Image (cartoon, rainbow, N blue to C red):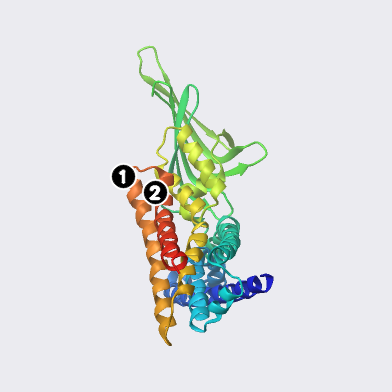
Amino acid sequence: MITLRRLIDREIFLSVATVTLGFLALFFFFDLMEEIKVIQQKNAMGYGYAQAMVYLVLLIPNHIYELLPITVLIGTVFVMARLAQSSEFTILRTSGLGPFTALRQLARLGLIFIALTWVMGDYVAPWAERKAQSFKARSMGESVIGNSGAWLRERGDDWQQTIHIRSAHVNGEILGVRIYEFDAQGQFKSMTLAARGVYAADSESWSLKDVQRRVFQPDADMSLAQKMDRLDPWIWNTRVTPEMVSVALLNPDRMRTFDLFQYIRYLQNNDQSSQRYEIVFWNKVFYPISCLVMIVLALPFAYLHFRAGQITNLVFIGVMVGVSFFLLNNVFGHIGNLRQWSPWLAAAFPGMIYTFISLLAFGWLVVRQ
């Protein structure tokens, strides 16, 4: 059985690696076409082909993370179909490889791919994404990311703040900070404008530069008296961290799971809607598990009987199933957000559907034989 496990492991790993490289080459070509358009723009004079190649290489980990469930399915389907066509799987069955033994073997491989997908999606891909965006911005003579701005809110026992951050510097510095402070009754207390700010991790506060601070206090006739100060620097004690700013400014799909969890808790503590980010969080939790679902879904192909030339058709079916899972995962995320479904259910439902299909196919094609 050790020899059989090594044979199946080697074949599947080699096939998945080959399919992954093929898809990466395709994605690299498409990305290169897009970057050529950027290079040809007048405002990208410092961004040439060498810089574009570095940028595209840094995007590879994120593509691997997105592709792994699909390539695991296609690679495993190809191996199972080829073993069935050449009657090698029949020989393995007569050598003691029963249906449930084969299922356990593929499940063990699925756990390995789960770990690989989790590491890529939670550590390697977010780090490479930040490096890629920073490198591209510096090469193009730009220094900021997220020009659309972000709104945040923070509450205390007797106060609340509404915060707007225009953009963030590639080194973590924030630009264009506006802080509107209210008391517990919603009375306007102060407005703070700052050109930029730097986070101090040791004191968990921001040092804001070029600050204009207006404090409003009621007079005897209940009108608001305004007092304006110019400060440089001004220490802003807040629970807002650079990671939260990054989540608010950038695509949450590219963030670490722990950073998303912290941001969700921050939103909930300040009575803000966190539905969208909760769905993304649970998607990142369940997405690696889809590798196990995909690899089990490929097992019944080993129990089919093929004629020559049918493997190509099966690989095409594998591609369609993988793409349909990816699309269904995205569709349920949007529907769950619009319909206010339970976030974990919206994220897990596609995987549950394909798990049911894989177990049904396993029971019909394998156990009945």
Residue 96 visible to the viewer: yes
Q: Which residue is mark 2?
A: 346
Query: Vertically, is 40 above or below 70?
Result: below
**Farthest-out residue, left:** 339
| Residue pictured at 38% horizontal, 71% vertical | 320
Q: Position of residue 188 (x, y in %)?
A: 40, 26
Residue 95, quarter of picture: bottom right
Residue found at x 60% / y 37%: 205
Callout 1 crowding tier (Cα within 10 Å): few <14, some 14–19, many ≥20: few
Is residue 41 visible in the rendered structure shown here? no
Q: Secondary structure at mark 1?
A: helix
Choose between 3 and 136: the one closer to the eye: 3
Depth order, front residue of 207/228: 207
Q: Is residue 233 left or right of residue 337?
A: right
| Residue nearest the observer in this picture, 231 or 307 | 307
Residue 246 is situated, as x and y percent measured from the top left of the image, at 51, 49
Near mark 2 (Cα within 10 A), the count class, few <14, some 14-19 or many ≥20, is: many
Q: On screen, 311 above or below 110?
A: below
Residue 356 image position (x, y, % from top left): 41, 57
| Quadrant of the rendering where the N terminus is positioned | bottom right
Spot occupied by residue 7 in the image (x, y as percentages of width and height): 63, 75
Q: Name the kind of residue labelled 2 in the image.
A: Ala
Q: Nearer the viewer, residue 36 or 232?
A: 36
Look at discs 1 and 2 and give the one toward the viewer: 2
Residue type at mark 1 is Arg
Q: Residue furthest top?
A: 220
Q: CA distance from mark 1 to mark 2?
A: 10 Å
Disc with the residue nearer the chain's start (1 vs 2): 1
Which residue bears the numbered disc 1?
339
State yes or no: discs 1 and 2 in contact (Cβ < 8 Å): no
